[in-house]
Amino acid sequence: MIELNLKGLPCPKPIIETKKRLDSMCEGEQLKLFIDNETAYHNVTAFLKGINAFVNGNKIKDEFIIICQKVAYINAASPAETDCETPSCFCAPNVDRKLVVQLHSNVMGVGDDDLGNTLILAFLDSIRSLPIVPGTILLYNSGVKLALIDSKSLEFLKELEFLGAEIILCGTCVNYYNLKEKIGIGRISNMFEIAEKLTSATTIVKP
């Protein structure tokens, strides 16, 4: 049985790391999770039950232990595309070209900016782990700061781009903040293209 230590990880990392490990396993293999807080235990349990992968869970002293089993996801590759003789059975996510994520700020929500920064990083970390990848991620106003070379969000955006997402930055915004030489990812564009992407999208996500 494979084991995974999720102790000390902030939300939503326990779910993300659980999903990543399950994605690397073959159908029928079991995974034993170690968790050190009740909130994460309930969140991971709910996620596993949602994909019919939960087997059982117990609390032993100050530790939560969950046993789960890899099942075939709805968006998983067909048996012909998956070779379970190899160490990894990773199924590449689908890219929805009509799904647009619109990020107008480098924080999420209104209120405390430190909390907002934590939330936007958690959001980007979450969407890179979903089975559907947005076709386009639009960054405008202070949202362009998420693409800076020294930004904590850069690694998340790089992975999303690798998975197939197109990252587009508002050129007016980049110039306004004088960031052109500091951009680490994405393509600088104009408001016409941004408007075109938004009006042709089937789904727009604006956290």
Image (cartoon, rainbow, N blue to C red):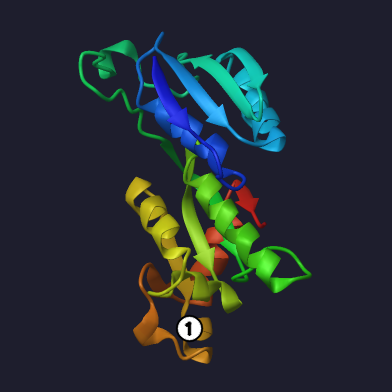
Q: Describe residue 54's horizontal placement relative to residue 2 as left or right.
A: right
- Any part of residue 45 in sight: yes
Point 44% across, 29% down: residue? 4
The residue singled out by tag 1 in the image is 174
Secondary structure under the numbered disc 1 in the rendered image? helix
Q: Nearer the viewer, residue 189 or 127?
A: 127
Q: Tell me where residue 190 appears, x and y as whole percent.
A: 47, 77
Name the quadrant of the N terminus. top left
Whether 106 is drawn above or below 130: the answer is below
Q: Nearer the viewer, residue 91 or 31?
A: 31
Q: Nearer the viewer, residue 176 or 108?
A: 108
Name the quadrant of the C terminus. bottom right
Which quadrant of the figure has residue 2? Answer: top left
- Any part of residue 200 in sight: no
Point 47% across, 66% down: residue? 152
Figure disc tally = 1
Whether 179 is drawn above or below 31: the answer is below
Q: Tell me where residue 192 appears, x and y as whole percent.
A: 52, 73
Point 65% across, 17% down: residue? 58
Q: Tell me where residue 107 appears, x and y as whole percent.
A: 64, 68
Q: Describe residue 90's horizontal placement relative to residue 100 as left or right.
A: left
The residue lying furthest to the left in this view is 86
Name the amino acid type tagged 1: Val
Q: Describe residue 99's horizontal placement relative to residue 84 as left or right.
A: right
Point 63% across, 16% down: residue? 57
